[in-house]
Amino acid sequence: MNVKNNPADGFETDFWKDDAARKTWDDLVPGAPRKTVPYLLTKEAIQKYCRSVGDLHPLYFDEEYARKSVFGGLIAPPSIHILLMFACTPMDDWMRSPGTINAGQSWSYATPARPGDMIRLEARCLDKFIRKDRLFAVHDNVFFNQKNEVICAGRGWTIRPR
C-alpha cells in the first residue's frame, strides 16, 4: 500500500509545482472516482494543523484531558478534512489547481479522526457546468478510517480556472 507522507514531515507549499500535470475542467468526468491515496494521520500532523489555525483545545494536545473526555483520547478537530483533502490526493488532482475558488461547501461529521488512523478518501466529481462564463464543478468527498467508519462527508462547489 502506498501511503502518502505526512504534512508534518514536510507538506508541499509550492502550489504551482506540477501545475501542468493537473487535470483541467475539460478532463472532469461526472461520476468518475478521483484517484486518492491513504494517509496515516499522526498526532504531530494534528497538532501542527491545530497550531497553524490557532485551535489549541486540549482535546487535541492534552492526553490526560482527552482521555477523561467523552472521546476517551486525543482526537483531531472536525476541520481536519482541510488537511486530509490535500493529504489524500496526488499532486495531479484537479482540486489542487491554483486559481480554484471555493464557491461553497457543506460537511457532516460522524466519527472523530484520531492519531494513528489510516485515512481513506472516496471522492468524485458529480457535475460540471458553465454559468455566466465561469466553469463550475460539484464534487463529493467521504473520509473513512481503517475501520471503514465515516469520519466526515461533504459536498462542495468550486469555480475552476480556465
Image (tube, helix red, strand yellow):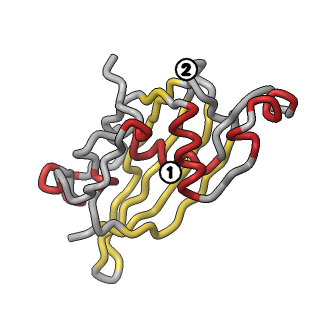
Q: Residues within 10 Å of mark 2 (few under 14, many from 20)?
A: few
**Residue 148 vertical placement versus 130 (above, below):** above
Q: Quickly name the residue at label 2.
A: 146
The residue located at (61%, 32%) in the rendering is 150
Tell me the amino acid under the disc marked 2.
Answer: Gln
**Residue 152 vertical placement versus 157 (above, below):** above
SS type, badge 2 = loop
Q: Is residue 96 left or right of residue 77?
A: left
Percent position of residue 1, x then y:
34, 16
Percent position of residue 151, x then y:
62, 35
Tell me the amino acid under the disc marked 1.
Answer: Ile
Percent position of residue 116, x then y:
56, 23
Q: Quickly name the residue at label 1.
A: 82
Image-quadrant location for residue 100: bottom left
Q: Is residue 125 left or right of residue 80?
A: left
The residue located at (33%, 49%) in the rendering is 30
Nearest to N terminus: mark 1 or mark 2: 1
Q: Using the image as rendered, state which of residue 129 and residue 89 is in the foreground.
A: 89
Q: Which mark is residue 152?
A: none
Image-quadrant location for residue 71: top right
Indicate the quadrant containing the C terminus: top left, top right, bottom left or bottom right. Answer: bottom left
Residue that lies at the very extreme toward the bottom in this rendered image: 132
Residue that lies at the very extreme toward the left in this rendered image: 20
The residue located at (55%, 20%) in the rendering is 146
Q: Residues within 10 Å of mark 1 (few under 14, many from 20)?
A: few
SS type, badge 1 = helix
The residue located at (30%, 66%) in the rendering is 160
Q: Is residue 125 left or right of residue 120?
A: left
Q: Using the image as rendered, state which of residue 142 and residue 115 is in the foreground.
A: 115
